[in-house]
Image (spheres, grey):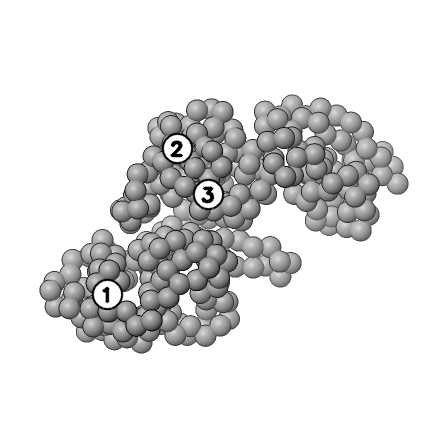
Amino acid sequence: MLTFTPITLEANHGDEEAVLILRAERLVAIASRLGEHHGGAAGEWFVETVFNDGLRIAGRRCATLEDMTSLIELG
Amino acid sequence: MQANDNDVFGAVIRKLERLGTLDDADRAAVRDLPVVVGQAGNNSYLVRERGSAGDCYLILDGYVCRHKLSSNGGRQIVSFHMAGDIVDLQHLLFSVADHNIQSITDIRFARIAARALRDLARRRPMVAEALWRDTLIDASIYREWVLNVGRRDAKSRIAHMLCEFAVRREAAGLGSPERFDLPMSQEQIGDATGLTSVHVNRMLRALAEEGMIARDNRDVQIVNWANLRRTADFDPIYLHAA
């Protein structure tokens, strides 16, 4: 089961709201919430990085964290 | 449409004269080429990978890209081309396309039969040299793009793409290098630089916040050329004045 731990990124591009995505206390990925300057994508969750090379979802976007769960579980 | 109009041959001759010295006989031979002018909408394919390729295309208006697709559907744009560029000289000698050529705006083009262009090159050495030089410049640009995607950070990649676009646009006589409409979408810029459209958006914003560019949608103004060039690690020598 995945858990989402809110964090703040020290980013200078404005997308500071983020979550650590963990499974059994192991870090799977980091996703940030896109700000207003991303136009139509604003508010979506963006996969910044993934720590398992087999999970090819870096750079993908999801409307909600529920969708993010599906994306990760389905790989 | 059969084209005998001077603007098409003028475009071919201007392109070749940027690459080499032509005499009157060379120019006359170019004007004898069978050329067909056509137009296509945005996202149209001029050439498809693995397709047979019997023609060469000179872009008269608009922009196209060359790209390749990976087996998982990922697209890598390997070059952008603008009015005045002949986009597939390799088809003078290769009959099967090894990449795609697709418009990124509405375009107008001149289609020249590869066989006719090949015959012209055999008869007119200075034309052959100009075409050869063009393919060598293409290769030089590819080398620079490999460096850009492989070894530069995200901000430098975007800055480099902007610098190259500005310089090539000016060399092609398409207007000021300091202000232009960028024809590529952020997704296309991402596919050319190995970044996501999210990263492209962030980097364009960073370049603007740092005072190197100003932009309003696709209208881009280069405000501080020296800083942009430094950030891009841009040295135009690889363009060989193309």
Q: Distance between the residues labelled 1 and 2?
A: 35 Å
Rendering quarter of residue B169: top left
Dot 1: few (<14), some (14–19), or many (≥20) neighbours within 10 Å? few
Q: Residue B221 carries which label?
A: 2
Secondary structure beneath dot 3 equals helix
Report the residue marked by disc 3. Answer: B148
Q: Mark 3 lies on which chain?
A: B
Instruction: Check the residue under mark 1 and report the chain it is in.
Output: B
The residue under label 1 is B5
Q: Which of B57 and B235 is in front in this view?
A: B57
Residue B40 in the image, given as x and y percentages of width and height: 43, 62
The mark nearer the N terminus, 1 or 2, is: 1
Asked if the residue under mark 1 is in contact with the one under mark 3, i.e. CB atoms within 8 Å, the reply is: no
How far is mark 3 from mark 1, CA to CA?
Answer: 40 Å
Residue lying furthest front in this view? B1
Q: Residue at x 47, y 28 (%)?
A: B208
The amino acid type of the residue labelled 2 equals Gln
Task: Name the amino acid type tagged 1.
Answer: Asp
